[in-house]
Amino acid sequence: MKSEVIVPPRMRAIIEGAGYAPAVRAGNLLFCAGQFGRDDDLNVIHDPEEQFEACWRNLDEVLSAAGCSFADVVEMTTYHVEMSRYMDLFREVKNRFFPRRTCAWTRIGVSELAHHGLLVEIKAVALIPQC
């Protein structure tokens, strides 16, 4: 089975600078790398609510580049810094973007993420719709 790297145009800096793919298609599955709440220049967004919103928009952009939507996500893992402090706000933002009860979801509390100031990372697997 061949795989295909998925890179939305706005995310070219990630693969060029950081050296990883935003997503990889393997058969009818899309494996999305963890998405962060950063702006177009890859700067961390410091306001928690805005950071969470950007995180979901980034994930949506990666899914869309492969012909998927949030409804196609079958598994999601979220990594949280200060989970107990921010979970209510994160869940509120999530419910604005992501359909409820549609996938398996694991939440993990961590001490830090890849860049100072990041509060969450969202990793997902989606089933690519058949054309």
Image (spheres, grey):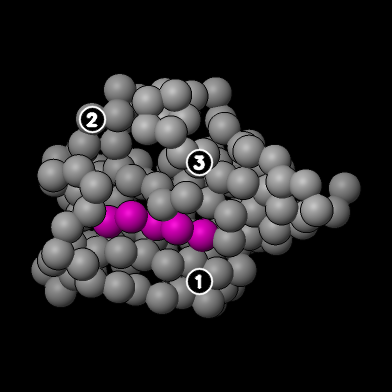
The residue lying at 30 percent from left, 64 percent from top is 79
> Height in image: 65 above or below 93?
above
Mark 1 or mark 2, whichever is nearer to me: 2
> Height in image: 15 above or below 120?
above
Q: Is residue 55 visible?
A: yes
**Which residue has dot 2 on it?**
43
The residue lying at 70 percent from left, 58 percent from top is 29
**Which residue has dot 1 on it?**
100
Residues rendered magenta in the picture: 120-124
Q: Is residue 49 visible?
A: no
The residue lying at 13 percent from left, 44 percent from top is 116
**Mark 3 or 1 closer to N-term?**
3
The residue lying at 41 percent from left, 52 percent from top is 34
Mark 2 or mark 3, whichever is nearer to me: 3
**Which residue has dot 3 on it?**
22
Query: CA–CA distance between discs 2 and 3?
Result: 17 Å
Kind of residue sitting beneath label 1:
Arg
Residue 127 location, x and y as percent?
A: 70, 61
**Mark 1 or 2 closer to N-term?**
2
Crowd rating for badge 3 (residues with CA inside 10 Å; few <14, some 14–19, many 20+): many
